[in-house]
């Protein structure tokens, strides 16, 4: 508890000698150790939204709600002011299962569900802390600060510990990469000086929180996501490219505004602590934790949203989540959107199964539906032009993207807990997407009978035609050679798919396996892994 800091100036020494501590005006607490994260934690998108409560005020309200899953702060990547809201914890019946588990430790339960400030225990870059609204529990990696006094509210404390002054003080108190409760409560606190700047600091921090929250909610990995910026009134242009240009301008402006706010916050605290000339208030852009416009990433996010609309997870007619409960149907979709099927702007897929193949073999082919989505969402412009912009941004043909890259991007976005699953033969001769929340025990039978077998029949018919083409002397040699090569390719696909049907798809379809979303993606995916695209490291132990 006696840090060695021989390089400090007399002024910094005097701050530690004269100032009070943050711990006098706030309470910092460590959180839960579950003892088995695989059993008790989920990413919010894995489970049924109906079994989740995001906004309970206290434990009594949580118990009365009858819900199972509640927000859980677990640290996460370097991010400031708001965000990293990704995990849920099973706290049904006041944490009955958690309390019964011998390895779990439930520290400081009286602080559960309270609003506060959280930070990540371990950081390899900078110290980032964030506001947390009421409704969450917290982890040892996402410990929290709670403010007891109206004179020193969360916004003020967040401004202080986010400042460069606190960053420098933390380097003195703890030069390691782990930021413990004991380090935060020992930060020096100049009561009189901070009271003077408090109103402005609260304004600055409140603005920073609003910007960071809007940024977090721009993406579908937020549980408060409503719609993508590219389709939002005020940003949406006549074309997809125009929309992206508007988004680029807005995101750049948000970063500049956040820089201004953080710099002013630093300046005020530097002056309050008498550190003018010792610290610089300017904040480098790389320390601003907001999304940058990136045309390739933004087009992958746009296509992900389009697939979400195809599956019924989202709708162009109503912002936010639509189908996000186990076994949801189109009847549930129509009821929530408040429109009959014929009145919808864009109709979700009838069975929640979308073919991802090397050609347009089915009406609901993923590329055909993407074109339809573009036609509806940008009705004033050409589908061809918008599709060209997507392909130029991705650096490849859209069909090639869906066949080779879409699922990789989906796994990265959802951190190996996908909500759209790729049913795929080992050598990728057949592929289709299914939606976890619309899965039923008959889904694989629908894949088998409505897509896989008809696809093989179409391939066989095509193979027969190619055989005739090869024998047709009226065709140019080049065309007959092309027919031969295509026939060889189809023959290989047929051979692979027929073996896969007998070894994997048919046996699993016959088992009519049921999934329980509460078990999470990891457990459920492994039940069907013989017919799904592999996820590297899925079976690895969680941290």
Image (spheres, rainbow, N blue to C red):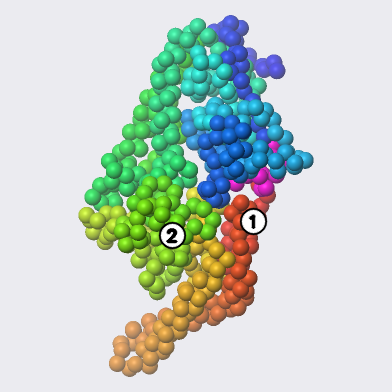
What residue range appears in magenta?
A: 33-42
User: Residue at left 63%, top 14%?
Assistant: 6
Q: Residue at x 69, y 36 (%)?
A: 33
Q: Residues within 10 Å of mark 1 (few under 14, many from 20)?
A: some
Query: Residue 523's mark?
Result: 1
Q: Secondary structure at mark 2?
A: helix
* Disc 1 element: helix
* Disc 1 from disc 2: Cα separation: 28 Å
162 or 354: nearer the eye? 354
Mark 1 against mark 2, which lies toward the viewer? 2
Residue nearer the viewer, 90 or 414: 90
Residue at the front extreme of this rendering: 64
Give the image location of residue 130, x and y in percent. Answer: 51, 30
On screen, 421 above or below 288?
A: below
Residue 35 shown in magenta:
yes
Disc 2 target residue? 331
Counting the numbered discs, the total is: 2
Residue 440 image offset from top left, x and y in percent? 55, 63
């Amino acid at each position: 508890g006696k840090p060695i800091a021989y390089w400090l100036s007399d002024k910094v020494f005097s701050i530690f000698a004269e100032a009070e501590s943050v711990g006098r005006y706030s309470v910092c607490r460590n959180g839960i150790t579950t003892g088995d994260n695989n059993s008790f934690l989920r990413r919010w998108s894995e489970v049924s939204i109906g079994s989740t409560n995001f906004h309970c005020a206290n434990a009594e309200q949580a118990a009365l709600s009858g819900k199972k899953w509640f927000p859980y702060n677990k640290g996460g990547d370097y991010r400031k002011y708001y965000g990293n809201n990704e995990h849920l914890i099973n706290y049904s019946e006041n944490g009955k299962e958690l309390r019964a588990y011998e390895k779990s430790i439930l520290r400081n339960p009286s602080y559960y569900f309270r609003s506060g400030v959280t930070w990540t225990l371990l950081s390899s870059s900078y110290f980032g802390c964030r506001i947390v609204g009421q409704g969450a529990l917290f982890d040892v990696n996402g410990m929290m600060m709670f403010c007891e006094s109206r004179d020193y509210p969360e916004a003020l404390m967040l401004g202080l510990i986010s400042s460069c002054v606190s960053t420098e003080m933390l380097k003195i108190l703890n030069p390691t990469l782990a930021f413990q409760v004991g380090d935060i409560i020992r930060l020096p606190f100049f009561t009189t000086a901070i009271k003077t700047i408090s109103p402005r600091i609260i304004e600055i921090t409140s603005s920073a929180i609003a910007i960071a929250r809007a940024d977090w909610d721009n993406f579908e990995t937020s549980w408060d996501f409503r719609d993508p910026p590219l389709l939002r009134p005020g940003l949406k242009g006549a074309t997809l490219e125009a929309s992206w240009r508007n988004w680029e301008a807005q995101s750049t402006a948000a970063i500049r505004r956040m820089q201004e706010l953080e710099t002013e916050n630093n300046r005020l605290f530097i002056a309050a602590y008498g550190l003018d000339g010792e610290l610089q208030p300017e904040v480098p852009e790389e320390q601003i934790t907001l999304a940058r416009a990136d045309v390739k990433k933004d087009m992958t996010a746009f296509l992900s949203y389009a697939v979400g609309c195809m599956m019924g997870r989202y709708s162009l007619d109503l912002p936010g989540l639509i189908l996000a409960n186990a076994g949801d149907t189109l009847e549930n979709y129509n009821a929530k959107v408040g429109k009959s099927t014929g009145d919808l702007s864009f109709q979700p897929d009838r069975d929640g199964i979308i073919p991802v193949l090397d050609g347009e073999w089915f009406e609901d082919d993923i590329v055909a539906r993407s074109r339809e989505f573009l036609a509806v969402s940008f009705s004033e412009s050409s589908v061809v032009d918008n599709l060209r912009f997507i392909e130029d941004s991705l650096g490849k043909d859209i069909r090639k993207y869906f066949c080779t890259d879409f699922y990789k991007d989906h796994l990265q976005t959802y951190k190996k807990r996908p909500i759209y699953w790729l049913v795929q033969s080992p050598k990728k001769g057949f592929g289709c997407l299914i939606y976890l929340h619309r899965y039923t025990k008959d889904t694989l039978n629908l894949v088998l009978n409505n897509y896989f077998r008809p696809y093989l029949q179409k391939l066989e018919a095509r193979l027969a035609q190619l055989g005739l083409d090869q024998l047709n002397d009226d065709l140019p040699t080049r065309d007959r050679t092309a027919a031969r090569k295509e026939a060889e390719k189809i023959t290989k696909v047929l051979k692979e798919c027929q073996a896969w049907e007998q070894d994997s798809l048919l046996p699993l379809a016959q088992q009519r396996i049921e999934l329980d979303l509460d078990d999470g993606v990891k457990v459920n995916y492994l039940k069907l892994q013989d017919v799904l695209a592999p996820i590297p490291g899925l079976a690895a132990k969680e941290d």
